[in-house]
Amino acid sequence: MRVCGVELTGNEAVISIIQLKEGLYDVPKVRVAKLSLADAINTEPLKKFQFDFAQLMKDYKVDTVVIKQRDLKGKYAGKPLSFKIEGALQLMPELKVLVLSSAYIKEGLSKAQVRPDAREVGLKQFQEQALLTAFAYLEHQAEAQA
C-alpha cells in the first residue's frame, strides 16, 4: 500500500509518499516536495493544481491520500486558502482521500516501534508532518490487518 501524506500550509500542499510492503516501510524519492496554488481566485489555476496533484499520484501509484486536519478556529486555525486546496483534493474521483485528526495521528505514532525522521529518510525537514501523517495511517492499517 502506497500512501501520500499531505500537510496544507497557506497556499501549498506539502507531500510525502511512503509505502508499506511486506512489513517494511519505503520512502521513494519524489520529483516534488510540495505543490503550490499561485492564484486563489480564478478557476483555471485551481484546476491545474488539481490536475498536477492527480498526475503526481498516478505517476507514483498512490492508493490513498491522507491530509493532516487543521483547526477551524483559534490561534492555529487553517488559512481559508488551505481549505480550498483541501476541497480540490477531496473532490478528485480517482483517489481515496481522507482527513486525519491530530488525535488519530498521535495514536498511530504511539503504537509504532520506531518514529521516522524526515531527514533520515531523505526528505526535507518541512515534509516531517506529511510523513508522520502517512506513517500513522499505515500503522493503523497494519494494526487492523493483524
Image: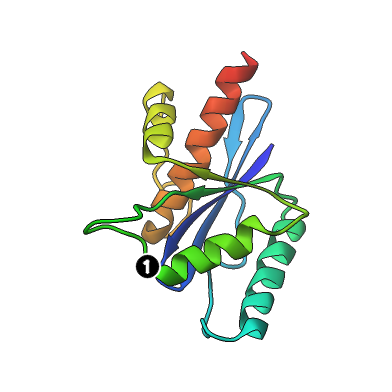
Quadrant in which the N terminus is drawn: top right
Is residue 142 or residue 101 the one in the foreground? 101
Residue type at mark 1: give it: Lys
Q: From what the image shows, is residue 88 above or below residue 113? A: below
The residue lying at 63 percent from left, 56 percent from top is: 90
Q: Position of residue 141 (x, y in %)?
A: 59, 27
The residue lying at 72 percent from left, 51 percent from top is: 95
The residue positioned farthest toward the top in the image shown = 146
User: SS at mark 1?
Assistant: loop
Q: Is residue 120 left or right of residue 98?
A: left
The residue positioned farthest toward the left in the image shown = 75
Q: From what the image shows, is residue 25 above or below residue 80? A: above
Q: From what the image shows, is residue 46 above or below residue 18? A: below
Is residue 2 or residue 30 the one in the foreground? 2
Q: From what the image shows, is residue 56 above or below residue 121? A: below
Q: Residues within 10 Å of mark 1 (few under 14, many from 20)?
A: some
Q: Is residue 45 visible?
A: yes
The residue lying at 62 percent from left, 24 percent from top is: 23
Q: Position of residue 47 (x, y in %)?
A: 68, 76
Q: Is residue 30 visible?
A: no
Q: Position of residue 92 (x, y in %)?
A: 71, 59
Instruction: Please give the residue where the numbered disc 1 appears in the rendered image.
Output: 79
Q: Position of residue 74 (x, y in %)?
A: 24, 56
Is residue 80 or residue 119 the one in the foreground? 80
Q: Is residue 89 left or right of residue 71?
A: right
The residue lying at 29 percent from left, 56 percent from top is: 73
Q: Is residue 35 left or right of residue 114?
A: right
